[in-house]
Amino acid sequence: MDERMIAKCNTNGYREYRIPGILSVKDGFLLAFEGRVDDLNDWGDIDIIIMKLELDGTLHEILKIGESHLPADGTMRTYSNPVLVPDGEGVHLIYHRNYEQAFVVTSENGGRSWSEVREITDVYRRFPYEWNVCATGPGHGIQTGRGRLIAPVWLANGELYEDGMRRRHWPSVAGCVYSDDHGLTWQAGGVADFMKDANETSVAELEDGGLLFNYRNRNVDRHRVLAVSEDGGESLGERWTSAELRDPMCFGGMTVNGREVLFVNCDTETKRTDLAVKRSMDRGKNWEKIWEVDSVGDTRTLRR
């Protein structure tokens, strides 16, 4: 298996790169990161960095959003939770500032150029939930077979820290925003309020057109919760807890390949280790592990 270093800690002025997302475009791949400068918590000085990996292997930065390398002035400048949403040959980037404002910027040519930034915080205000923290993803959004754009989001109503600026990320609920006009306008979708503190969520379109949502949560059993929407994310129908998807409160990515649903996360209940890929052939009801990506420094294929 070929490996390549994309971003390394303590380089280019960033102490750490976090929550990577990847999206395939016509002439390569777009990569989204948070670049965290001097504090590894979610409220530090953070920039959003978008890189492009060309088909010939060339890697270069194409977009940076943030203020973290300006002289410190005591104000909050956290730019976070970038989510890339495909739209034909174009792509939309949704991101947040200080967990209180949401923005979108669009590229119609695979990331070579970008539109002016538009604020879409008012969309998040339409959810039936009083929040003081808003965020997308992380990971990536999707475009359904009918053309609808879907981006998972989460909202929290947390108490203030002693500094009077940062806010806790609990209690929380998860949902999605969607667009039927190629990102010109966005709408608030259904809210998952049937578990304890849902937040970072993955979504995939099933072969039959249903949307499968896969939720990180704080339920005591430390397992992922899943739900299906049959109306494009506007509401949620069947929901269940999967005993086969253990989770240590960490994001996990999901995609589909025909009938096959693939999910990757840390396959433990307590530690962010043992990255593994699992597969479901029945709309997320049952899962089997097919690949231990990283287990105590070892990379092994169980079934491919």
Image (spheres, rainbow, N blue to C red):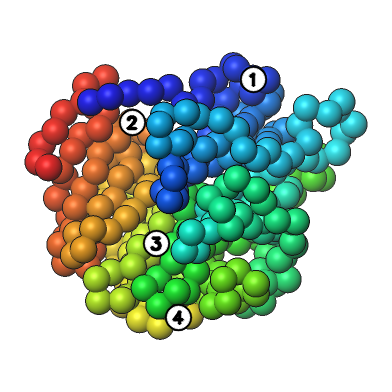
Determine which residue is flagged by label 4. 235
Dot in front, 2 or 3: 3
N-terminal of the two: label 2 or label 3? 3
Q: Is residue 244 left or right of residue 270?
A: left
Determine which residue is flagged by label 3. 203
Which residue in the rendered view is the most extreme toward the top?
A: 10
Residue in the foreground of this view, choosing between 83 and 267? 83
Q: CA distance from mark 1 to mark 2?
A: 26 Å
Q: CA distance from mark 2 to mark 4?
A: 33 Å
Q: Amino acid at mark 4?
A: Ser
Q: CA distance from mark 2 to mark 3?
A: 22 Å
Q: Quadrant for the N terminus, please.
A: top left
Dot in front, 4 or 1: 1
N-terminal of the two: label 2 or label 4? 4
Q: Amino acid at mark 3?
A: Val
Determine which residue is flagged by label 2. 273
Can residue 22 be seen here? The reply is no
Q: CA distance from mark 4 to mark 1?
A: 43 Å
N-terminal of the two: label 4 or label 3? 3
Determine which residue is flagged by label 1. 12
> Residue 230 appears at what percent x and percent y?
35, 81
Q: Are marks 2 and 4 in contact (CB under 8 Å)?
A: no
Residue in the foreground of this view, choosing between 158 and 205? 205
Q: Amino acid at mark 1?
A: Asn
Q: Is residue 206 above or below residue 36?
A: below
What's the residue at 31%, 76% (across, down)? 209
